[in-house]
Amino acid sequence: MGVRRVRPRRWHLWRGRPKKATGRSRMTQRGTNTHFHKWRRSWISTLHLLLALDLLPLCLPPSTMDSFAEPDKFRSAAPLNLADVRAEVLRLEQDHRAKGIPLSGRILHLCHYLPVTLALSPPNDSTGIPSPPATPPAKASDIPESPTDAASPALATPKEEFKSSEGKWKIGGRYGHSAMISGISSLAATHEQLIIGWTGDVASTVPIELPPVSSRTDVPEHPDHSPHLHHRTVSSIASIATAQDDEEETGAGKKVPLASISEQDRKSLEETLKDYPEKIRGRKEGEKDTAYVPVWIDDKVAHGHYDGYCKQTLWPLFHYLLWQDVATEYASADQHWPSYYKANEDFAKKVAEVYKPGDLIWVHDYHLLLVPLLIRQMLPEAAVGLFVHTPFPSSEVFRCLPRRKEILDGMLGANLVCFQTYSYSRHFTSSCVRVCGYETTSRGGIDVQGHVATISYCPVGVDAERVGRDVLRPGIQPKLEALRTLYEGKKIIVGRDKLDVVKGVVQKLRAFEKLLQDYPQWIGHAVLIQVTSPALSDSPKLERQVSEIVAHINGEYGSLDFIPVHHYHQTIKKDEFYALLSVADLGVITPLRDGMNTTSMEFVIAQEQTKKSPLVLSEFMGISNNMSEALQINPWNLGEVAAAMHRGLTMSDEEKLRRHTSLYHTVTTQTSHTWAGMLAKMLLEQLGRQNLAKQTPFIPKDRLEKSYLKATKRLFLFDYDGTLAPIVKVPSMATPTPATLEALEKLAADPKNIVYIISGRDGEFLEQHLGHIKNLGMSAEHGGFIREPGSKIWANFTENLDMSWMDEVLEIFKYYTERTTGSQIETKKSAITWHYRSSDPEWGLFQCRQCQDLLENNLARKRPIEVLVGKKNLEVRPIAVNKGEIVKRILYFHPDAEFIFCAGDDKTDEDMFRALLLFQNDNSKAVLEAPLSVTLLADNDTTKFESVELAVTRDDIFTTAVGHSSKRTLAVWHVTTPEEIVEHMLHLVATSAAPEEKSNL
């Protein structure tokens, strides 16, 4: 209670006006020196008291920098109704078109695979000996056949085959990523769609004869007289289904090398795929066109990209496994990097081929993380979004990746980087800050040389309508009844996962054993049916471990008439799958790390028609935050998982209904269709923001050269850090390169040129590294000092200014330096700078913003100072001193200059660009009044300075920002790196020397 009474007084001390010792509420004559110095002494005394008591943080405003609290924006603010989302998309598009922002009405989706499989007839198919047809699979007459899978509205299934007009290409649907493809396809209601993806391996249409199913040793024979007929029927049906699917996939024949596919055949396929989706599933009323665009990737590159870098490096890393944990023969994380880069480059080139101005581009998943930057380099004005479907690891794990910076830079080429959960987006932001040293914006974006990438999240759902139809299929009910009969009197626990180390199957089995140990009443009364499908990579060790655990549990707790665990390592048909989900008394899904898990959502939808059974869900899944009514557990805590299983099995019907109702609402509103609509909405929102509103063009070398050569007097005004030298972690290491020194020396040697370095560095640093260059002018400390070309004397602009505020600022900076390890104070003659580049990046930025808030809302209101936020630093300087004033001074004394080149990279350089906005409206002449930087150094106060008319024209002023083209700047042109500034200067020197040499000849 004591703190609560004191805090308002402290808040008033810092936020309000300072009080006098006599008790008066305000300083009535703050403008007088007497009253001001009384307040100053009182203010500093209070500051020392607060520092001594360590109570200063209590005086600060509530922090807005808590990056660990998940925002509620998606749940509360975002419209989850699909109609509302689409209406918002339409409104945004109308607003953008009214503002003149071009929109094509198309969305380009880049996916690793096209959602189709391809087979090609060999050239001699029509003339050679025809191949015999494949042997049809045998079907056991007493096994009920599962109905043919209904086609998803999102894509065709493999049974829906289609042939091109020439008959060479045979096209079928591809299984996998159904939620993503379903969401993408739903956008056809509002936009034209181009789905761009790799063709996959092209098979030959020449079939390979396969033995009958009945003769295969891997398919269990049907038992005619078995007490567990129905139980084994499920396994047999699943095995036959798997065999049939394999036959359809492999029976087409061997792979066709890409090099053997002619250009004519490629063109034929591309034409066929343009309207393939419409031919297969038709077009609903009002739907827009959807086309598939194949990316042709060399076979070796394609498999090095996917089977190599994606599966062996990125996928393990994103799931908190390092490559040496999954590698077999070697543990190189970099071997397949060239293939990964080349495949991403092929995708970017394909986008550049089909792109139209106003297209929206969405890049999907970890296979294509370099594509956003590659597209940005080819199409600077494109609106690019990146959605990462996998988890994103913490920065401490991600920093192990050798190509970490290349991956992050590639992702940050997008305007919007989106993840499944807030925690993944926070991990990504932390990696950008800690690994690359990039800074975050006030809105949470990442600033990369002026290009701001917005970071957001949006959970993916399933196609709830399709799943709702699937669970009502006629083939499901007989299997459901058979399972009920088989396990009558027992509680059925169901799990379905890929047999992968991150899916937590081992932990689930051990937790079930723990359930039988801790709650022995379930022995003989609860069974676990665990279905595992093959994973991305085979793991015999994991298969053996699972089999051993299953055998142990069944041997320890089973009997002649009771088997606790039924494990099926196979792909089961859709009917069997939904029958299992529908009959379950409890669903258990325990991944150790996962992005989206469709089984959990399908379980909820299936249970709507049956028992409303509860769900045990791992807290390490991307969707766990949205499914808060599930029984969330830590899969590593076996006792916790066992207790959750017991609770789920004994839960009352009322609690089951309450939890299920909430989960069902979540699953049926946050669907794949809503997710896709939200992606379109979020990217459209980025179009209206500053980072896409104005693109600064790259400086034209020919125009620069022409203007340079015709001028009789030229001005060159350069910033130093970030413009002539790259930004480095240790400021003293930012030394000029030989090329930079050569360019400055040659420019300054030309009598037509006036060259200045206008830097925030102190004069001593500039003298040390650049002082030897003749006729080079220098301005130090952001315009606080100036040394004219050919002079050795520094003129001080602050001599006539009140600099007493420096002691107060120094006290505040000392406080933050003591509490921010690695930070330091740089005291200049005209400014004070607090650097935090060597401190923890997140803590340093947090402290910087707190300090900035304190200075701006208290001291800056009372003293003639301004607070500048730089790159990893905070600087306080007099208002009258800045780089813009120096530029005005140089212009005033050189009004006959006919060419001006000014380059800078950060916020302090915007003062220079602002000073060079000389032409108002359509005026052809510019007139400059005497600036403050001229009058401050006048010999006497009676000197009068007249206005001067400038000789330069509008087109001969080249203000140039160093950084990305989307950087917010007053500059007219841009270059990307400091090296390009030096390159342009050397080019100008060379071009000016060439005519002179020619004339001498």
Image: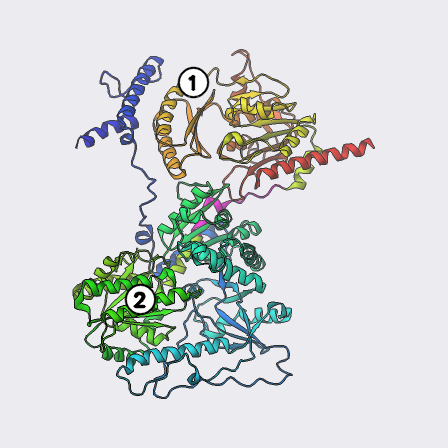
Instruction: Say what secondary structure mark 1 lies in.
Output: loop
The structure residue drawn at horizontal position 23% and vertical position 30%, both measured from the top left corner, is 7
Quarter of the figure with the N terminus: top left
Viewer can see residue 474 = no
Q: Does the magenta stretch include residue 696?
A: yes
Relative to 954, is 882 above or below?
A: above
x%, y% of residue 791? 62, 18
x%, y% of residue 968? 49, 40
The structure residue drawn at horizontal position 64% and vertical position 70%, both measured from the top left corner, is 262
Label 1 Cα neighbours within 10 Å, binned few <14 / some 14-19 / many ≥20: some
Label 2 Cα neighbours within 10 Å, binned few <14 / some 14-19 / many ≥20: some
- In the orientation shown, which residue stands out farthest toward the right? 1001
Q: Does the magenta stretch include residue 353?
A: no
* Amino acid marked by disc 1: Met
Instruction: Say what secondary structure mark 2 lies in.
Output: helix
Q: Which of 776 and 953 is in front in this view?
A: 776
Q: How many labels does the image show?
A: 2
In this rendering, position of residue 322 left or right of residue 406:
left
| Residue underneath mark 1 | 803
* Amino acid marked by disc 2: Ile
x%, y% of residue 434? 43, 42
Of the two numbered discs 1 and 2 in the rendering, the one whose residue sits closer to the viewer: 2
Range of the magenta residues? 684-699
Q: In which quarter of the image is residue 658?
A: bottom left
Q: Residue 549 carries which label?
A: 2
Q: In which quarter of the image is residue 590?
A: bottom left
Q: Which mark is residue 507?
A: none
Q: Which of 249 and 371 is in front in this view?
A: 249
Compute the Cα span from label 1 to label 2: 77 Å
State if disc 2 and disc 1 touch (CB < 8 Å).
no
x%, y% of residue 587? 27, 66
